[in-house]
Image (cartoon, helix red, strand yellow):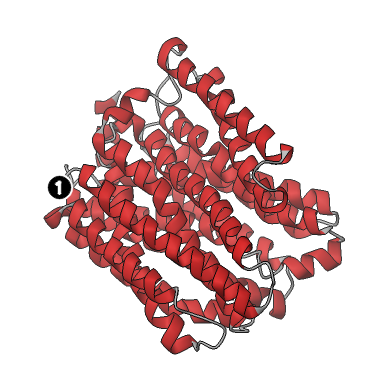
Amino acid sequence: MTSIGTASRRATSRTIPTWVILALACAAQFMVILDASIVNVALPAIREELGFTSTGLAWVVNGYLLAFAGFMLLGGRAADLFGPRRMLVSGLALFSAASLVGGLATAAEVLVAARVAQGVGAAMMAPATLAVINTFFTEPGARAKAFGAWSSAGGVGGMIGAVAGGAITTGLSWRWVFLINVPIGALLIAVALTSLAGTHAGRRERLDLTGAVTGTAGLAALIYGVMQSADHGWFSAQVLVPLVAGLVLLAVFTVVEARFADRPMMPLRLLKIRGVAVGNGMLLLFGGITIAMWYFTSLLLQNVLGFTALQTGLGQTPAAVTFMLVARGSAALLPRIGVRPLVLAGSAGFLAGFGWLSLADAGSGYLPAVLGPTLLIAAGIGLTFPTLMAAATADAPEGDAGVIGGLANTAGQVGSSIGLAILATAASTTAAAGTPAALADGYDLVFLIAAGLSLAIALVSFLLPRRQRA
């Protein structure tokens, strides 16, 4: 089956330029990450028109993130079994249809359901894009550059969400935050159907239903429990019950995959690949870095320095551009110098940037206290993120590219969710007074913790292979 798939891939690559395939993967990833952030600025308008409660409004964001992270591993395995083309097209179709429903929603419950469906569609798309890259870009240099472009697309999607959301909500309506996905999704479906035609359809194996149910439910319960910690505290029943249930389900999932599944959804043998195991562990830690950078600097700008949401998005744009440029450059360096030097250089950027950022207070200005350190941190993310994604997926067998891509995406999302909960708790203990000075102290603590995470990433990097293997 592998030889047939390889032959089909080569036949397709001769007729379709590889830049078209890379552009498709990047555009799909851009949509996935953009929709995780673009609605944030539109939330007040959504609340006013649809009558959300404060608790219910959070699920416009959390519903998407929960489904996205919870179903990612299943989406990755489905890409291996049914083919990345089929899963990418199906994910785009579901994502676009859910966007249409969300844009036309007249009730709060309908919008939340649409956001959950969007998250499931995104969980089908994201690992499929990685499987496409692993399938069509096999030469180490070309694959590294493809990962750099893919990483940049996701990072820029996350960053321009606030700016785009503010512009669309102000100029048109919050509904167009969702409706704009429909024509874009239709275009990408057409490109996927033509550019990926002739690729192998996957393997004729049954889906591991027991593993799919326990793994997906376990991840969803774990992430749900972490999300609840922001409102209820770590030792409340609302947090402990789903956390314990999630851990039990994941333990059952591990036993099923190791002993009982004939065709496991997540073959544990893949974790014996050093780059996969260590790369995913580092992506868990890296999730805390990204949350500290993008989320908490946004809060610093708005709650301490008095920026509007649109000004905040513009204020973070230089960091987004820096990330994009450095990510492309690091992709070119990866085949020559290997993963460890790039991760160490990125960690140095984190340490210097977060250390500098932790000095910000209520009297600080944007240029001396925020711009410089965020540029350093963004450069560190540009050096580190594509490198870790490449390390975590580089040695994937062709038939397991989807599930390894899903695992890497899941690690990053779970790390971000846990990082957000822990860092928000740390910030709240210091910023209880709610004044700009107290809030600045809370965010400074977050930045110091992130600096500690950068040291942990640097130490773990010595477990990574010295050089990227073909």
Q: Relative to 196, is 432 on the left or the right?
A: right
Which of the image's four quarters has the N terminus? Answer: top left
Of residue 380 and residue 164, the one placed in the foreground of this image is 380
Residue pictured at 84% horizontal, 68% vertical: 48
- Indicate the position of residue 419 as horizontal and vertical percent values: 51, 52
- Indicate the position of residue 118 as horizontal and vertical percent values: 63, 48
Instruction: Say if 366 sits above or below 85 in the image.
Output: below
Of residue 140 and residue 44, the one placed in the foreground of this image is 44
Which of the image's four quarters has the C terminus? Answer: top left
Label 1 CA crowd tier, 10 Å (few <14, some 14–19, many 20+): some
Instruction: State the SS at label 1.
Output: loop
Q: Relative to 400, is 360 on the left or the right?
A: right
Of residue 51 and residue 286, the one placed in the foreground of this image is 286
Give residue 225's quadrant in the image: top right
Residue pictured at 57% horizontal, 84% vertical: 362
**Disc 1: which residue:** 467
Instruction: Say if 382 sits above or below 371 in the image.
Output: above
- Indicate the position of residue 394 as horizontal and vertical percent values: 26, 42
Q: Relative to 24, is 95 on the left or the right?
A: right
Q: Amino acid at mark 1?
A: Arg
Query: For the image shown, how many numbered marks are present on the structure?
Result: 1
Residue 245 visible in this rendered orientation of the protein: yes
Residue 157 visible in this rendered orientation of the protein: no
- Indicate the position of residue 164 as horizontal and vertical percent values: 59, 73
Instruction: Say if 273 sits above or below 453 in the image.
Output: above
Give residue 106's quadrant in the image: bottom right
Residue pictured at 70% horizontal, 80% vertical: 171
